[in-house]
Every structure is written in structure tokens, then in C-alpha cells.
Image (spheres, rainbow, N blue to C red):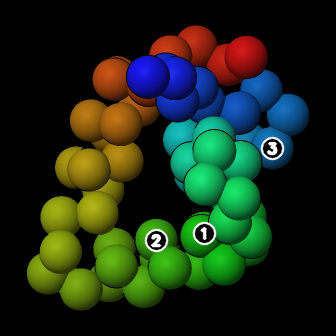
Amino acid sequence: MKKIHRSATDRVFAGVLGGLAAEFNWNVTATRVLFVILALTPFPAVITYLILWMVMGDPA
């Protein structure tokens, strides 16, 4: 199984959303907008982001 890496080029903070978008062939802007919407709801989006930051590999 291929390990997902944070993005080295398409990053705003840590490259987590850019890495996920690249791996799953998603639009990066749509991914970021979805994250902001989820962060404004009771969904623990910020905690999920921090966990992914620690789990995902270094930028490739």
C-alpha cells in the first residue's frame, strides 16, 4: 500500500490537504473549502487535521 505524503508544493500550512487532494485526484480548492465548512461545524476537523499532519509522511 502506498503511503500518502504531505504536499511540498501545494501547501498553505502543512501540506496535508494538498497531499490528500493529490493522492485522491481531488480539486485542492474544493478540498480546502470543504475543510473550512467542516471546521465550522461540530465535526472535529482541526483535530483530524493535526492527527493527519503527524501520521502522514514528510513532503515528497
Residue lying furthest front:
1
Picture residue at 77% right of the left edge, 26% below the top: 8
Task: Give the Cα separation between the discs numbered 3 and 2.
Answer: 15 Å
Rendered-image quadrant of the C terminus = top right
Figure disc tally:
3
Picture residue at 30% right of the left edge, 56% below the top: 46
- Is residue 18 at least partly visible in the picture? no
Disc 2 and disc 1 in contact, CB within 8 angstroms: yes
* Left or right of 38 in this view: 41: left
* Relative height, residue 50 to residue 33 (above, below): above
Q: Label 3: state its secondary structure.
A: loop
- Is residue 51 at least partly visible in the picture? yes
Query: How far from the left and from the top, in percent, is residue 27?
Result: 74, 70
Residue type, numbered disc 2: Phe
Residue type, numbered disc 1: Arg
Residue topped by disc 2 = 35
* Relative height, residue 12 to residue 35 (above, below): above
Q: Label 1: state its secondary structure.
A: helix
Picture residue at 36% right of the left edge, 47% below the top: 49
Residue topped by disc 3 = 10
Disc 3 and disc 2 in contact, CB within 8 angstroms: no
Query: How far from the left and from the top, in percent, is residue 21?
Result: 65, 55
* Left or right of 37 in this view: 46: left
Task: Give the Cα separation between the discs numbered 2 and 1.
Answer: 5 Å
Residue type, numbered disc 3: Asp
Residue topped by disc 1 = 32
Kindly identify which numbered label has been placed on residue 43: none
